[in-house]
């Protein structure tokens, strides 16, 4: 607030409080106390104080300004998140705190807080993967995308109904027909063993 603005404020307060005493030195004294505050904030604070009492002091104007600014700064908080995401990397603690303080200061000044579009927020997220890292493949059949069902790397294969299943043979690098033959042979061995066990049981029962 400039000295001329302090004169305007003193005249405004005198109009609000006709019974309050002012002289030619009042604006100078008030400027020493209120120089750090904006005229608009001081006028609004003086009017708020004058609604409650017949006299207005600089200390009461300052207290009202601070209360109003605190309320504005608190209003930037949405349901768990600020209305405006601080424009700083959260990993850089000092820069993030500085951006957050700047955000609260702008809110206290009465500036409209801008909600940033999601696309803008995500634009700087992520890092380019070096070729030598991208070339590293996860071991096992889940290390490649399944050519049979389209399951992505690291995710299990799925049947047509969406349920998970064992990895397709194409994903493990085995030949499909050879895999079928292997499974049939394994099933035959198990079935043959079961039949042999049943024959032994029947033989013991007959004896």
Image (cartoon, helix red, strand yellow):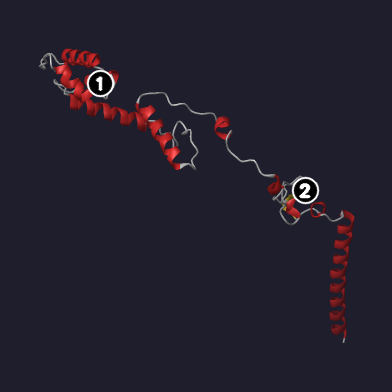
- The secondary structure type at the circle numbered 1 is helix
Please state which of residues 64 and 184 is positioned toward the viewer in this rendering.
64
Within 10 Å of disc 1 (Cα), the crowding (few <14, some 14-19, many 20+) is: many
Q: Residue furthest bottom?
A: 207
Horizontal and vertical percent for residue 20? Answer: 11, 17
Task: Tell me if 63 is positioned left or right of 163 in this view.
Answer: left
Numbered label attached to residue 42: 1
Confirm or deny contact between disc 2 and disc 1 (CB under 8 A). no
Above or below, 81 against 29 in this view is below
Above or below, 129 against 173 in this view is above
Within 10 Å of disc 2 (Cα), the crowding (few <14, some 14-19, many 20+) is: many
The residue located at (77%, 48%) in the rendering is: 146
Q: Residue 204: name its quadrant.
A: bottom right
Horizontal and vertical percent for residue 34? Answer: 22, 23
Horizontal and vertical percent for residue 45? Answer: 24, 22
- Label 2, on which residue? 146
């Amino acid at each position: 607030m400039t000295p001329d603005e302090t004169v305007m404020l003193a005249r405004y307060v005198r109009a609000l409080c006709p019974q309050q005493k002012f002289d030619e030195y009042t604006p100078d004294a008030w400027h020493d106390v209120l120089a750090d505050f904006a005229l608009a904030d001081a006028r609004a604070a003086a009017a708020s104080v004058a609604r409650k009492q017949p006299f207005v002091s600089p200390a009461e104007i300052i207290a009202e300004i601070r209360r109003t600014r605190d309320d504005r700064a608190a209003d930037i908080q949405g349901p768990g998140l600020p209305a405006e995401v601080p424009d700083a990397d959260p990993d850089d603690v000092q820069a993030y705190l500085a951006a957050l303080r700047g955000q609260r200061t702008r809110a206290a000044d009465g500036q409209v807080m801008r909600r940033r579009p999601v696309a803008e927020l995500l634009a700087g997220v992520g890092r380019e993967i070096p070729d030598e890292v991208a070339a590293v493949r996860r071991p096992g059949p889940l290390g490649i995308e399944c050519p049979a069902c389209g399951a992505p790397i690291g995710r299990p294969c799925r049947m047509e109904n969406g349920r998970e299943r064992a990895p397709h043979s194409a994903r493990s690098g085995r030949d499909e027909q050879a895999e079928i033959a292997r499974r049939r042979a394994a099933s035959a061995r198990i079935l043959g063993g079961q039949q042999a066990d049943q024959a032994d049981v029947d033989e013991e029962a007959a004896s």
